[in-house]
Amino acid sequence: MYLEKIQSPAQLKQMSFEQTDILCKEIRDKIIDVVSKNGGHLSSNLGIVELTVALHRVLNCPEDKIIFDVGHQCYAHKLLTNRYEKFDTLRKTGGICGFPRVEESEYDCFNSGHASNGISAALGMARARDLLGEKKKIAVIIRDGALTGGMAYEALNDIGSNGSQLMIILNDNGMSISKNVGALNDYLTHLRTSKGWKNLKKRTSSFMLKIPFCGKALHDFFQKIKNMVRGLFIRDRFFSSMGLHYFGPVDGNNVKALTKSIERIKDYDQPCILHVCTEKGSGYHPAEDRPDLYHGTPPFCVETGSIDADDNYDFGKSACDILMEYASEDNRICVVTAAMTGGTGMKDFAEKYPGRLFDVGIAEEHAVTLSAGLALGGMRPFTAIYDSFLQRGFDQIIEDISMQKAPVCLLCDRAGIGSHDGSSHHGLFGTGFLSCVPGLTVLAPVNLKELKQQIKWVLSQNMPVAIRYPKAEKKRLSDVDVCFVPGKWSIIREGNDAAVISYSSTLSQVLAAADICAGKGISVKVINASTICMVDEKCLSEVNIPFIIAEESVYSGSLGEKIAAYFAGKHITPRLSLLNAGEEFLPHGSHKDLLRMVHLDAESIADRIIKEITTL
């Protein structure tokens, strides 16, 4: 076994290609084994094993730098950089992260959680190297899906201005999370499959190998010069127009071919792009057949590929069902997603109304402004984007939606504390950055019944709205009786000793805390603040017992901060206590552990309630 003996990627330089092929299989087996138990990103990591081995075989890390544009494809990199012994802790509380983290290893040079920013970071490092007179090599791996993001093009446009040496590895697997879309995908497909080029290679190679005595030598010579004539058959002028020297396509699951190609470009004195074609899910048949299903997967059975069932009801899927119901009678309803048709639960809408769902790729800014244009053109767009990904569209929300009062509904999935993906994926900022925008109504349904009421209300209005919800409905909340009224909070449990105001999934912990308190003789009123962009003054004026506001949000911009400001403006000093995620970035870990870490679990909330009561 080779993998468990590798303490440094420098050891790869001493291995034969036959040995690295065995190593790649061991890496795949380890990734499959750990992800099957811990959950994680499987397909993309299986596809990039050979490329990771080849890069570390050629480069001298950590002096040389490898940036992963989409950080979740770093598993093989972690296994090769002295983290094999810790790999079983992947994504667990206190374990290694599923994304590169500079605080975790000197081999991780850039924290990358979202997409399309890797080329900018790599170019910055390359220019810093040049200014400091250093010789290190800089490589960035960017997937073809990430090239649908506008920031990648901003960086590509800037690269040619001074020609800093830089290696861009285009990991082309034809997919991001959902199937890739757009003109660039068509272009890359052409590069991969150009009939003229493929036919020329096939005919010429066959002919040369049949020539007696010198056929093999001629064939090898032809292989060396084929890149010189590729331009006659394949349109590779797109990258050259940006000042990049294009190489490829190269078999991305062949260590030998990759090593030779990377060796060729690493000392090139100009920025280069190496086009590598990989197979997402390579080496594990279920992931090869359904790379989208195993992109980010919960634990699963390795032998059968069956994924552990989740008996929680999905908010995104429910939103899709509601929209399909209304769309049958209202042809103005359409959906916009940013490479997340499946992740946001909108797959069925895409299949039923293919002309009314627009998947724009990893381009959240464009998705938001496209939605504004659709709305001002007479449609009623629902824009489904993860809460943490929507951060990139903040300017567009202000300028293009809210200032123009465009009737767009932002469906903000994965709101609140996430879990195993870590700081870049927690939806902790949405309450603040959405609620501060004038004219944007921000809602947070407690369950699927309230979600339907809110969507129905949205369709009766002509104004921008954001609806923030977690991945799944909590069982404790499914039976909560709701009657949504915009701007009004509702009492879902009566009590006389203390009141807790909360919203969305945090209410499940609040209700559990109320049960704990009831066992100690303390009666707790629980209030559902389903409109979170404003305070319900009438509700606050009617509660004359200690207040606690519990929410999965950072402090700044939180509902608790708004309530505190409201009372301060009225020169009222109530017994007010704020429970939130604080001002620090939360790490990865189980949802239960993270709630306990920020004192938003039921036991901690109950302790705070009891403390407030006993210190009166």
Image (spheres, rainbow, N blue to C red):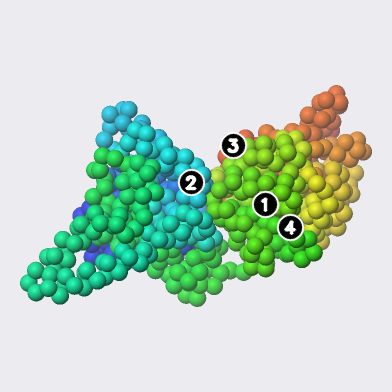
Specify the label residue 584 is tagged with.
3
Q: Which residue is mark 4?
A: 333
Per the image, label 2 sits on a secondary structure element best described as loop
Q: Amino acid at mark 1?
A: Thr
Q: Which residue is mark 2?
A: 116
How many C-alpha atoms fall within 10 Å of the one at disc 3: few (<14), some, or many (≥20)?
few
Q: Earlier in the sequence, mark 3 or mark 2?
A: 2
Residue 590 visible in the picture: no
Residue wearing tag 1: 383
Mark 4 → mark 2, Cα distance in angstroms: 30 Å
The amino acid type found where label 4 is placed reads Ile
Percent of width and height locating residue 403:
72, 36
Residue 614 tag number: none
Residue 270 seen anywhere in this rendered image of the structure: yes
Q: Is residue 282 left or right of residue 315?
A: left
Per the image, label 4 sits on a secondary structure element best described as strand
Looking at the rendered image, the disc whose residue lies closer to the viewer, 4 or 2, is: 4
